[in-house]
Structures are given as C-alpha cells and as structure tokens.
Image: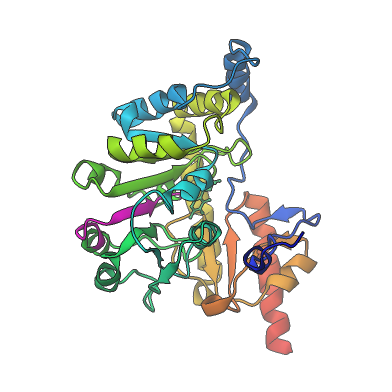
Amino acid sequence: MRVRELVKSFEPYRVEEGDYPVRLDKNESPYDLPNWVKEEIFEELRELSFNRYPHITSMPAREAIADFYGLSPENVAVGNGGDELIRYLVRLFEGGYVVTTPPTFSMYYFYAKLNGIPVLEVPLREDFTIDGDAIAEKAGNASAVFIASPNNPTGNLQPEEEIVKVLDTGTAVVLDEAYAEFAGKTLWRLIEEYPNLIVLRTFSKAFSLAGVRAGYLLANGEIVDALYRVKSPFSVGVMTMAAVKVVLRHYDLVERRVAKIIGERERIRRAFREFTYPSDANFLLMRLNAYEFLLGKGIAVRKLAGRLDGHIRVTVGRKWENRKLIEALREFLEVRECG
Ligand SMILES: *Cc1c(COP(=O)(O)O)cnc(C)c1O
C-alpha cells in the first residue's frame, strides 16, 4: 500500500511536542476555567445521558449561542472546533477554487488541498491588509474566499471597506473571527445584509476551551442547513455542548481575562516595539529570529516561514510567563549585539 504524494507533502505538525515549561505557541488562553465554573459544567453533565448520541444538529449548543447573539439557532452551526467547520466550508459552495490571503491560517489551504480543491492565493499587502479589489477580481469563479480578521499570524484586523468589496461580489466569504474578542470589533451583524457572509468563531481562544473542541459559525439559514447536510452527524458531543452552555453564562469572566491579556500584550510590545507589529489578537508577530534561542530557555513559540521567515509568533501568556519571555528576548538581543 502506498500513501499518496499529496499527503506526504503535508508538513508534520510543527509545534514542538517537547517539555517546555512556557508554552506560547498555540494561541490558547493561558487561564484555565476556574474550578467553580468547572463545577457548573459537572452539574450539567450529571443530568445528561452518556449512553445516548448527542443531538444530531447540536441544538442545545446552537440555542445557547443564538441566545447570546439574539439570533435564531437557524443562523448558527457548531463544530468540533472551528477547524471542523473549515473542513466543510472549503467544499460547500460551487466554484473552481478557494481564495486565501497568505500569510494566513494554514488550515484553509490544508483542507482545500485535502479535498482536491485548488487554492488561489492573493497575498496580503505590505502592511498585512487584504487587497479587496484584487480578491474581488478573482472571486467570480471561486467557491469561497477565506479572510481571517484579526489575521493569524500577523495579528491585524482587516479593514471593513476591503471586506465589503469582497462581499459585494456575492461569492461566499468565510470571515474567520477566531480572535474577535481581543479586537473589540466584529462584523457578524453583516450576516443580515450579506447572505454570502459566514462568520467563523471559536471557544478555543478567549473562552479557554481549546481542549474541549468547540467552534461555531454565524450565517444565513440556507448555508447552515447545507452544512448540516454534509457534516459528520455526531462530532459535537454532550460534554462539549454542556461546556459551551456554561461558559456563555460567564462572559463577564471572559471579558476580564481578555482585558488582562490585552494589557500584557501591550506590555510585551512596548518592550520590543522596534521588532513587534501591532496586534488586535492574543499574540504578537515579532521580527526576531529567536525561535531556537527561546526553546533553549524552555519557551516554545511559533516559528514562521516563507514571507515571514525570521519571524516568530508569540502567544500572550500569564504574567510570569511573559516576564520570562521578555527576559529571554532581552538576552537574545544582547547576545546578538555582541555576536
Ligand atoms: C485557532 C483558530 C481557529 C479555530 O481553532 P479551533 O480550535 O479549531 O476552534 C480558527 N481560525 C484561526 C485563524 C485560528 O487561529
């Protein structure tokens, strides 16, 4: 038996799996849920039948999310992480290829290729904003356009007027707002105006649930219905739905944590302003070739390549983790000066 060339060409998962005391590589929340919130989840679990399959279209979680936004559950789809939803969105719409805007989240490219769908790349401009006109020009024959805002790994929000240029083409636009809670700006309300807009969100970042695996999208009912026709029926379990319901009841906690993370983000940025891009997310893009040096200090960050060769992406951590990061990077710069 031979493994397909295409599969072999996918890079192995690049995140360091070693034992690093400071993990700033996956854009997770550095704060676990407090025990009192976990207890509330356990209470919910007690009432559930573990022997039964979960609701086939995840209605309990969709209702909780819909209530949170003041939408109807018909406008909400839930997945096993936002990741699972991307897997379907690359092939849900008719068209010859998907459009992505590198450097950006690699999963759009990954799932398109895995599904045999060509990818047309419209690179970000020098300042990492999308070129709405250039994308719109290519969008006509595309099945979908993927735009992350704030973008991962560059950290910046995309200008609304550029996004609207793409929306006006009528092609499906997946607006990935995985980091919206940190940006304080979201375009989800545009789903009322644009039936071709799909806003993707996740519980993995601001909501501290990366280990639980829950993501969702907001879109018009026809798209949600189409997605549920092709989605794996039981990929969102009863435990995941219970956790989602409970964390949404405690959004005030999420907001306090987001404020703390933003404060820390700006503290790190001030320390290395010369090398650090502004960020609207919970991570920073730094023009520092410090990946190996930091690993040696027990700090894992994300190493970037291609156009961002020589850059690292650093997740904002807890205060003591950020302190270690700042110390290590100061040392890196000193060594570099002397070397
Ligand atoms: C983290 C992330 C997601 C979603 O991750 P899940 O854990 O699968 O929900 C989606 N898009 C971007 C850009 C991300 O960084």
Say if residue 197 shows up in the picture: yes
Residue 176 counted in the magenta span: yes
Q: Which residue is at the far front? A: 1
Q: Quadrant of residue 313?
A: bottom right
Q: Nearer the viewer, residue 84 or 296?
A: 84
180 relative to 329 in the view: left or right: left
Residue at 57% over, 53% down: 27
Residue at 50% over, 21% down: 55
* Image quadrant occupied by the N terminus: bottom right
Say if residue 255 shows up in the picture: no
Count up the numbered dots.
0
281 relative to 14 in the view: left or right: left
Residue 117 counted in the magenta span: no
Q: Quadrant of residue 137?
A: bottom left
275 over 269 or under it: above or below: below
Residue 164, x across and y down, in percent: 22, 59
Q: Quadrant of residue 287?
A: bottom right
Residue at 24% over, 57% down: 167
Q: Which residue is at the far top? A: 47
Residue 166, x across and y down, in percent: 25, 62
Query: What colour scheme has been applied to the protein in the rendered image?
Result: rainbow
325 over 186 or under it: above or below: below
* Image quadrant occupied by the C terminus: bottom right
71 relative to 339 in the view: left or right: left
107 over 225 or under it: above or below: below
Q: Nearer the viewer, residue 294 or 12?
A: 12
Q: Which residues are magenta?
A: 166-178
Residue at 70% over, 80% down: 334
Residue 106, x across and y down, in percent: 53, 62
Residue 311, x across and y down, in percent: 58, 74
